[in-house]
Amino acid sequence: MTPDTESSLEVATTGLSVDPTALEAPISLTPLSEAQRVLHQLIDAVKQKVLGRDDVIELCVIALVADGHVLLEDFPGSGKTTLAKTLGEAIVASEMNGQDGESSATGLSAFRRIQFTPDLLPSDVTGVPVFDPNENSFHFRRGPLFAHVVLADEINRTSPKVQSAMLEAMGEKQITVDNTTYPLGDLFFVIATQNPLDLAGTYPLPTPQLDRFLFKITMQHIDRDAELAVLDSHLAIAASSEPAPITVKQNDILAARETIKKQVAIDAAVKTALVDISRALREDARVLQGNSTRSIVLLLPALQTAAALDGRNYVSASDIERLLPRVLGHRIELTPGAGNFEKILHDVMAKPMEELARATLR
């Protein structure tokens, strides 16, 4: 008996009419489901090499897809370089030229690390024109900012002049050198770090620089079980020089970004709550400087991405409660002796969130 005959007999015994081509067709995903798959794929890629940092990984992926940047305030040896490098290596272009993982279309590397020091110059970050005697002309040599994921390590150890060189790149995804503008990729993403324990020889980040970061994440030491898992697996991870086997194409990430923007709804009551919380913070006597309107604008796609990651097509109050402290923590300046920012934010959020709950229950 042939396999085709067996298939026909099975159909006959069940009394069903089955299209053989339907059995071979792949299950089609909705655009939003596909976007959720991309989010989880990126998260899983980083989790392979970064243990005990699930919440930080999710926030970094949310910021990447929401077109934002992240500032990590952490301890040395907390895995920030591994996190950024793994995330960068997980992003691949549709066409590669085989040189250092660069895209043949944009020439951008997957990952670059910049170690900021007091003697660093802006040209060390952005790039510099180099004279070619053979052609008797200058050629622009790209700096480390030309990458998909850039780790700006100890960003507050360099001078304000170098810090300001990153403003245009982070805000407009382009770099201008000698009156010539060079575009960066649509997935340009900066993970910057600063050490909260060592203040000697540092330059505090100015307000415009801080405002370019979507999230500020204060990292703590991982728990006991996660630390034991790191000790058990560090030799295998260190011995592996290969990038993470899980990869996501740039076009898939961009498509997921557009899908989430269009298909995850933000109710008007959510926007009203965000504005009311911001205005209440600015008017609070304990607050010296409130958050900018830009911070709310940057927060909206992050809320949509967090909702999609949670399997929803709408933004809820839980998304606000999760992300708002990360967005406002580095933007709010308190008066001397004002106390704890989390307590102030909790007080200010109470009334707008209550009104949001009432509006969404109608």
Image: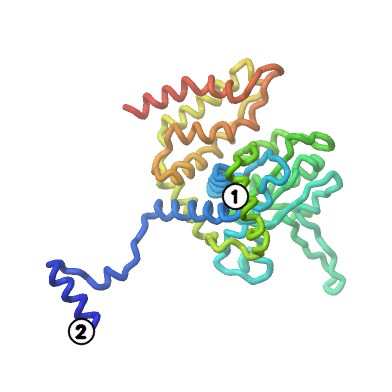
Q: Which mark is residue 87?
A: none
Look at the image and tell me in which quarter the C terminus lies: top left
Q: Position of residue 92 (x, y in %)?
A: 57, 63
Q: Residue at x 64, y 71 (%)?
A: 97
User: Alpha carbon of mark 2 to alpha carbon of mark 1: how far?
Assistant: 53 Å
Residue at 49% over, 33% down = 320
Q: Is residue 202 above or below residue 90?
A: above
Q: Which residue is mark 1?
A: 229
Measuring from the top left, give residue 292's x and y in whole percent. Answer: 61, 31
User: 45 above or below 22?
Assistant: above
96 or 325, nearer to the observer: 325
Q: Which residue is mark 2?
A: 1
- Give the structural element (helix, strand or loop) at label 2: loop
Mark 1 residue type: Ala
What kind of element bears circle 1? helix
Q: Of tags 2 and 1, which is closer to the observer? A: 1
